[in-house]
Image: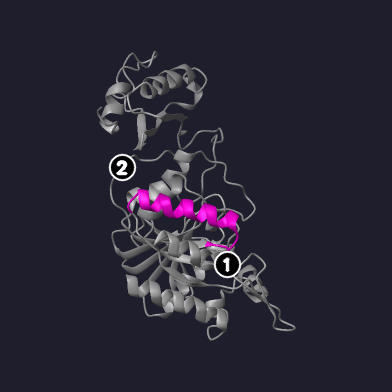
Amino acid sequence: MAEVNEGVVLRTLESVIDPEKGKDIVTLGMVSGIVVKGGHVAFAIEIEPERAGAMEPLRKQAEKLVHDLPGVLTVSAVLTAERAPHSPHPQPQQAAPQMPRIGGHASGSTEQLLTNVKAVIAVASGKGGVGKSTTAVNLALALKNLGLSVGLFDADIFGPSQPRMLGMVGTKPTHAPDGKKMAPIEAHGMKVMSLGFMMPEDNPVVWRGLMVMGALEQFMKDVAWGDLDVMVIDMPPGTGDTQLTIAQRVKLAGAVIVSTPQDIALIDARKGINMFSKVNVPVLGLIENMSMFHCPNCGHESHIFGHGGAKADAERLGVDFLGELPLDIGLRIASDEGKPVVVNDPEGPIAQRYRAIAEKIKAKL
């Protein structure tokens, strides 16, 4: 059985005729953002906004034809539309300021991105609420304190939190000197970019998957990151479009998985480890966050979420265990106030734990 690929999908879609223009949608250049992975296919059909209703039957036809191909398990075909720059009507989806293509469809390109970065590390988690973003920012700063030039890319499009954690809420990016790219924000000696710099903190992002993919590609391609030793990517939770897009478009040096000790979090952490394995990204190790709580009054250590589960899972799965981080009130306050603990209390015990983890990762790189 022939493997489904982009060429097969395009040849199939050549039989879909635009009824108004009398030509097939491939010849007309209407097909974009094709993604084929393990029998799952996604693509976009670009149309004029006013034709959205009339083109729905064509979308369904295209989706069915591709779904009928041998080896195809699922198909997602979406209609995308970009209004002319001077249209008097609002766009149907959000558009972020200063990056006019964000909110459009994915390019479908296979060009490798972030090639000026020596090592790109994804900090990921199987589920939300495990302290992944706190870990990402402090790990990035710890690597910077080890003498590396570091960038931090907030890839959590739907929940960008790095502007808050870095105390940079309200900061707006500017254009780079060449006028073609955007300059990253400078924070504590490292370069940072996040969608959170481009819209009010409480604005929801209501985008489809292909729009998210397009935005991610722009942040990696159209930001003047320059030459860096390391880039830490703060991934969204889960194993979806963002993870797949970054794994396809960036040569990742590895992934760091963050989990809490309880079983429900570890189940999702295993999914994350297995996902990176399937896309040939090495897992640098597992971090157990909220591993213990030290009472500030009596000093008693409590294991609120259990203890040692991540270490046991790391041993069972054959990945390195990078370290434990406590559930700490001071760490939570510092993050909310935009004062990362690695900067705010560099000689404190928590900062030293982050430094120890950073040293292990640096050695692996």
Instruction: Name above or below for residue 255 compared with residue 242.
Output: below
Q: Which residue is tagged 2?
A: 109
Tell me where residue 227 appears, x and y as whole percent. 31, 67
Amino acid at pointer 1: Met
Label drawn at residue 165:
1
Magenta stretch encompasses residue 264 = yes
Question: Disc 2 versus disc 1: distance between alpha carbons?
Answer: 33 Å
Q: Which residues are magenta?
A: 259-280
Amino acid at pointer 2: Ser
The answer to whether marks 2 and 1 mark residues whose Cβ atoms lie closer than 8 Å is: no
Magenta stretch encompasses residue 324 = no
Instruction: Name above or below for residue 318 compared with residue 30.
Output: below
Quadrant assignment for the C terminus:
bottom left
Residue at (33% x, 68% y) in the render: 228
Q: Secondary structure at mark 2?
A: loop
Judged left or right of residue 142, residue 148 is left
